[in-house]
Image (cartoon, helix red, strand yellow):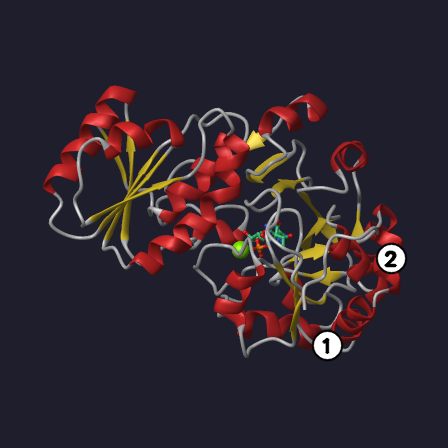
């Protein structure tokens, strides 16, 4: 049954939310919508419940979970040594698509924190998410509700594809708004460090913090000796089944490259492009091996973030053996888009 957007007060009364909250309180798993992607929720303070998440996702146990809360004060239960900048960021961007890493208190079990002495915390904006946490009365650990390695789910149907039979309940809140996961900022060092880019952009963070470091794992493939600070960033991610690469270059060279691919393709290739390039690519004529998919309009980068994971999942359904995607400018939300595209492509980039 689909739970439509309602206001918070109505949702607190909702019997479906009560049922979901009871499942979580008692150690079960519930997938629920957030404004970024669907999450797979469990009681963050119950070791056994958090462990079930790793089993359902097939997730490596050293990859910690984000703990979701419903009001800022809940942070005091689970984190300590909270710096002043935390309150400034929370005031500006919570509820919303930002996760903050703080020193954890003992009460947070190792299964939730992946054995680290820190905990990642987010106060989501989505009404269903917030009332679920509020009614459950416990912080809710929730990674993205996909099988480990697959694109994050932006619709309940994606969750169903990956999690059917492995979890207790899915709350269908329709398609999510943003489409890429939250921005993660580590506040345990002297200077705030961006660990994962999202809809709260680096530019927006710098406005509040003054100085922000960027974990190099966001933009480049690390050598084996380097480790990203967000453990999850080291795993191949969002990876479609086909071989994927990104093309980079000036617009005319990129279009020339794609045209020649369209002419010559003798195996299934998906081309991920933008609305503005559809006409010229289609004018190349028909080649049944080629599937041209638009990520959205270059004039509306938010639409590209919104469609990204859905399009990557579509590529799997098309059964192509190769995916070629256009690249984007890495400013604003473009940094988050390029981070997900590069990871999906295993940092396989062609300069044309
Ligand atoms: O938008 C989101 O953040 C979504 C929704 C459901 O809220 N959740 C999400 O969770 O994306 P997940 O588990 O797919 O990604 C969590 C990321 C991983 O890369 C993990 O390594 C990192 O957060 N992380 C969690 N705890 C951390 C910690 N204590 N220190 C550094 N990184 C941490
Ligand atoms: Mg994830």
Residue 137 in view, yes or no: no
Would you say 322 lies left or right of 96 here? left
Q: Is residue 152 above or below residue 46?
A: above
236 or 279: nearer the eye?
Answer: 279
Residue at 25% from the left image edge and 27% from the top image edge: 254
Residue at 72% from the left image edge and 25% from the top image edge: 208
* Mark 1 or mark 2, earlier in chain: 2
Marks 2 and 1: in contact by CB < 8 Å?
no
Q: Residues within 10 Å of mark 2 (few under 14, many from 20)?
A: few
Residue at 53% from the left image edge and 42% from the top image edge: 306
Q: Is residue 339 above or below residue 175?
A: above
Residue at the disc numbered 2? 10
Task: Name the quadrant containing residue 349.
Answer: top left
Query: Measured from the top left, where is residue 241 in percent x and y?
Result: 32, 59
Q: Is residue 164 above or below residue 277?
A: below
Query: Measured from the top left, where is residue 319 in percent x and y?
Result: 28, 59
278 or 145: nearer the eye?
Answer: 278
Residue at the disc numbered 1? 27
The quadrant of the rendering that contains the N terminus is bottom right
Q: Is residue 149 above or below residue 91?
A: below
Query: Measured from the top left, where is residue 317 in percent x and y?
Result: 35, 60
Which of pointers 1 and 2 indicates the residue nearer the eye? 2
Would you say 111 lies left or right of 166 here? right
Circle 1 SS class = loop
């Amino acid at each position: 049954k689909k739970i439509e957007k309602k206001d918070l007060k109505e949702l607190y009364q909702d019997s479906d939310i009560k049922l979901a909250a009871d499942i979580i309180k008692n150690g079960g798993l519930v997938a629920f919508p957030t404004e970024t992607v669907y999450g797979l929720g469990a009681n963050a303070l119950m070791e056994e419940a958090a462990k079930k998440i790793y089993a359902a996702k097939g997730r490596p146990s050293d990859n910690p979970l984000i703990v979701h809360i419903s009001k800022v004060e809940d942070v005091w239960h689970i984190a300590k040594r909270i710096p002043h900048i935390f309150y400034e960021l929370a005031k500006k961007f919570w509820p919303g698509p930002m996760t903050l890493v703080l020193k954890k208190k003992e009460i947070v079990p190792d299964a939730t924190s992946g054995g680290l002495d820190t905990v990642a915390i987010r106060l989501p904006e989505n009404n269903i998410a917030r009332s679920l946490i509020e009614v459950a009365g416990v912080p809710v650990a929730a990674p993205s509700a996909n099988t480990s390695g697959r694109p994050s789910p932006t619709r309940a149907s994606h969750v169903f594809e990956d999690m059917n039979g492995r979890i207790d309940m899915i709350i269908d809140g329709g398609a999510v708004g943003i489409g890429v996961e939250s921005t993660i900022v580590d506040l345990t060092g002297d200077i705030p460090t961006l660990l994962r880019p999202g809809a709260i952009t680096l530019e927006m963070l710098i406005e509040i913090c003054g100085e922000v470091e960027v974990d190099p794992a966001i933009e480049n493939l690390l050598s084996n000796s380097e480790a990203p600070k967000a453990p999850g960033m080291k795993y191949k991610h969002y990876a479609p089944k086909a071989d994927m690469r990104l093309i980079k270059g000036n617009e005319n060279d990129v279009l020339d490259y794609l045209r020649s691919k369209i002419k010559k393709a003798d195996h299934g290739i998906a081309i991920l492009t933008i609305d503005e390039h559809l006409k010229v690519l289609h004018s190349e004529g028909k080649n049944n091996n080629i599937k041209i998919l638009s990520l959205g309009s270059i004039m509306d980068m938010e639409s590209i973030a919104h469609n990204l994971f859905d399009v990557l999942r579509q590529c799997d359904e098309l059964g192509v053996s190769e995916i070629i995607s256009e690249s984007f400018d890495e400013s604003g939300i473009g940094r988050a888009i390029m981070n997900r595209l590069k990871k999906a492509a295993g940092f396989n980039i062609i300069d044309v």
